[in-house]
Image (cartoon, grey):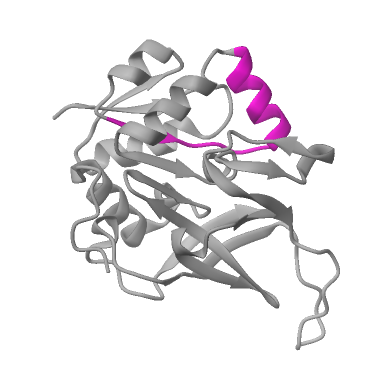
Amino acid sequence: MNDTVVIDFGMGNLRSVAKALEHVGARVRVSGDPAVIRRAARVVFPGQGAMGSCVARLAGHGLAEAVREAALNKPFLGICLGLQALLEFSEEDGGVPGLGLVAGRVQRFADGELLPGGERRKVPHMGWNQVGFTKSHPVLAGIPDGAWFYFVHSYYVCPADEALVLGRSQHGSTAFTCALARGNLLATQFHPEKSHHAGLRLLANFVSWDGTTRGED
């Protein structure tokens, strides 16, 4: 099987992502070398932390252009911050430009929302939540609508084109986009590598995916 490269730009739990991919049969390389990323059969762009640091590290390691090329030309999976960084702009860190691969912005969950039970909504949104899928996709094969996935985030994406939305979830009164898909690109706010059976199925589907959307509604 051809290499699946997990991008190493100094942020994110790369080991857990790599181990989950290996578990589903991928031959994995973790690399921050743009040349290795360009040669990869498929690319995973994970990340945890702040948007400003992410963009700065990508630029500092000479990776921004390699990420853009991969997201346009081969099976590509962004995870958590690896989703948010694809958009044009984030409110985080006082306002940070993203990679601009997806039109739209990233915004923060509002603090202090009073929930029906009298509790305050917690930010960050952390833990298990259900995902409703808006359409079929090869990477979702065998995953039921309403499956549970694991989240850790304070910011969420607001894409300009609703046609790109693949999945949504709910935190308090906020229904938010948690998965995007376009051509060879797939990106999720949740962490498949931490999401047990549904997450491993998504990763297994990704590893065998050819980057087309045959069978998509």
Horizontal arrangement in the rendering, residue 2 relative to residue 156 (left or right): left
Looking at the picture, how far across and down is residue 48, in whole percent? 60, 38
| Front-lying residue, 130 or 95 | 95
Q: Is residue 87 above or below residue 215?
A: above
User: Which x, y percent locates residue 168?
Assistant: 51, 68
Residue 8 part of the magenta-drawn span = no
In the picture, residue 5 is in which quadrant?
top left
Looking at this rendering, what residue extends furthest in the left direction?
1
Give the quadrant of the N terminus.
top left
Q: Position of residue 39 (x, y in %)?
A: 28, 18
State which region is magenta.
Answer: 42-60
Q: Residue at x 51, y 64 (%)?
A: 162
The residue under the point 31% across, 54% down is 202
Q: Quadrant of residue 171?
A: bottom right
**Figure quadrant of residue 160:** bottom right
Residue 43 can be seen, yes or no = no
Of residue 82 and residue 162, the one placed in the foreground of this image is 162
Determine the residue positioned at 74% across, 36% down.
96
Q: Is residue 55 magenta?
A: yes
Q: Is residue 65 visible?
A: yes
